[in-house]
Image (cartoon, rainbow, N blue to C red):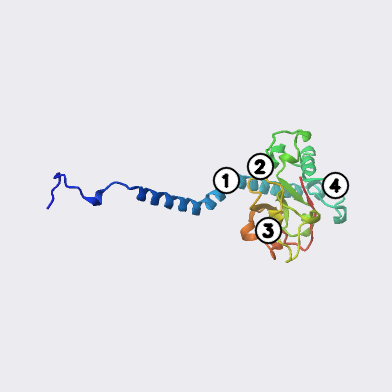
Amino acid sequence: MTTSGSGFHDPRRAGFTLKDLLAVIVGLCLLLALLFPYIAGRIRDATTLPLLHQCAALSKELSAKRLAGLSEEQVYPMTPESGGGGKQYSSSTDYFHHLIQDEVLACDYSFFGGAGAPPIKTMEAKRFTAANNAWSVVVDAPTTKNEQAPLFISRNLVLPDDRLPVGDDVNLQSLIENSTDQKLAFSNDRLMVVTISGSGSAVHKSKHLGPGKAHRLNPTSHPLPVLRP
C-alpha cells in the first residue's frame, strides 16, 4: 500500500515520451491538412468579397442612373447591332474612362481595382490602366432583358472570340484553368460575377463550373461580347 508523499513512483504519471510527442505532431499535421483548404478559402474570401460587393454596388448605381433619365447608351456599352448607337469601347478600361470622364459616376478610378489589381485613387484617365482594372464588361447584356445576365465578370477568364459561352457542351472549368491572369487573389479557383440586377456571386470552379453548366455564367441564349481590361 502507498500513501501520499511516500515517494512511490506511479508509472501512470510518467512524463511525455518522444513517442507521445510524435503522435501529437502527426495529429496536428493531419488536422491542419484537413483545415487548410477551408482556411485558404476564407482568406481569399476576405480579400475578394469586398471587391464583389463594390462591383455589385456599381451595377445598381448604373441601373439607378438609367432610371433617373440617362440614355442606355450613356450608361452601358452596346454594339451597333443592338440599336444602341452609342459610343464604342475597345476595352473595359476604356468604358470605365467614359463613366468617370463623362460624369456618369461620381467616384475615382480606385473603384474598379482590388484583390490583385492595385487600385489607383485618381481622377486622371491616363493613370488608370488595365493593371488597375479587375473587371471585364459584358456588352449588350441589358438588351437581353434577363436580369440575371452578367454585366461584370472578373478578368481571370479565357473566352473564345471574347464571347460569353452558350450551350451544354462548354466546359466552363477550363475557362478558368487556362487563364494567364494569375494576379487576382482568386484567379485559379473562382470567378466573380455581377448581374445587371446588381446581384453578385463567387462562382467556384470545383462546384459550379464544368461541362453542361454554361447557364450558370450566361443564362441567355446569346453569345454576348465581352470587353477585357
Label 2 to label 4, Cα distance in Å? Answer: 27 Å
| Residue where numbered disc 3 is placed | 173
Q: In this view, does 8 lie to the left or right of 21?
A: left
- Mark 3: give few (<14), some (14-19) or many (20+) Cα within 10 Å: many
Could you say where residue 45 lies in the image, as x and y percent from the top left? Answer: 58, 48
Mark-to-mark CA distance, 1 and 2: 13 Å
| Residue matched to label 2 | 116
Q: Is residue 108 left or right of residue 16?
A: right
Give the label on residue 46, or none. Answer: 1
Where on the picture, by quarter, is residue 122?
top right
Label 1 CA crowd tier, 10 Å (few <14, some 14–19, many 20+): few
Lower position in the chain sequence, tag 2 or tag 4: 4
For label 4, the SS is loop
Estimate the spatial distance between the alpha carbons at disc 4 and disc 1, rounded to whole Å. 35 Å
- The residue lying toward the viewer, choosing from 92 and 6, is 6
Residue type beneath disc 1: Ala
- Who comes first in sequence, dot 3 or dot 2? 2
Label 3 sits on a secondary structure element that is helix
Q: Is the C terminus in the top left, top right, bottom left or bottom right quadrant?
A: top right
Task: Report x, y in % for residue 210.
Answer: 67, 62
Q: Are marks 2 and 4 in contact (CB under 8 Å)?
A: no
